[in-house]
């Protein structure tokens, strides 16, 4: 059930929840059982954020013009620094 709730979150909402869990765990004021549950949720939130970022990165491309004037796209990572 938690995974269904997490999957429906936006990247921004997942990141906020993850940051809140980290602060709570770092405070040390959480019971052990609750800390374990929070950690498990944090792992799922982290995975969701990583997947969403990876997906976004795959969608970002640059447009290149070949010597003959044809347009094509290439991964943004291949952009040469000016």
Image (cartoon, rainbow, N blue to C red):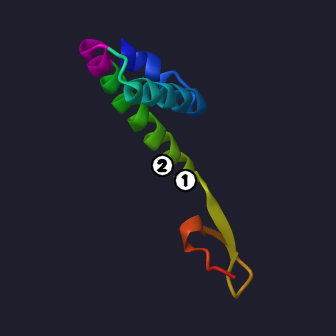
Placement of the C terminus among the 4 image quadrants: bottom right
Residue 31 in view here: yes
- Percent x, y of residue 14: 52, 28
Quarter-wise, where is residue 48 in the image?
top left
Q: Residues within 10 Å of mark 1 (few under 14, many from 20)?
A: few
- Percent x, y of residue 54: 48, 49
Q: Which mark is residue 31?
A: none
Magenta span:
31-37
Circle 2 residue: 54
Depth check, front residue: 59 or 45: 45
> Which residue is rendered at x = 26% and y = 21% of the image?
36
Quarter-wise, where is residue 63 in the image?
bottom right
> Which residue is rendered at x = 50% and y = 31% of the image?
19
> Which residue is rendered at x = 54% and y = 68% of the image?
77
Q: Main secondary structure of the magenta part?
A: helix
- Percent x, y of residue 39: 32, 26
Whether tag 1 and tag 2 are in contact, CB under 8 A, the answer is yes
Circle 1 residue: 57
As displayed, is residue 75 above or below residue 50?
below
Q: CA distance from mark 1 to mark 2?
A: 5 Å
Element under disc 1? helix
- Percent x, y of residue 7: 46, 24
Q: Residues within 10 Å of mark 2 (few under 14, many from 20)?
A: few
Q: Is residue 52 magenta?
A: no
> Which residue is rendered at x = 36% and y = 11% of the image?
1
- Image position of 5 (left or right of 34): right
């Amino acid at each position: 059930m938690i995974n269904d709730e997490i999957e429906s979150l936006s990247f921004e909402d997942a990141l906020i929840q993850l940051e809140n869990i980290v602060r709570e765990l770092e405070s040390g004021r959480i019971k052990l059982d609750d800390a374990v549950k929070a950690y498990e949720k944090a792992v799922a939130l982290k995975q969701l954020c990583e997947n969403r970022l990876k997906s976004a990165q795959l969608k970002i491309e640059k447009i290149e013009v070949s010597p003959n004037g044809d347009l094509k796209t290439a991964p943004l990572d291949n952009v040469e620094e000016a």
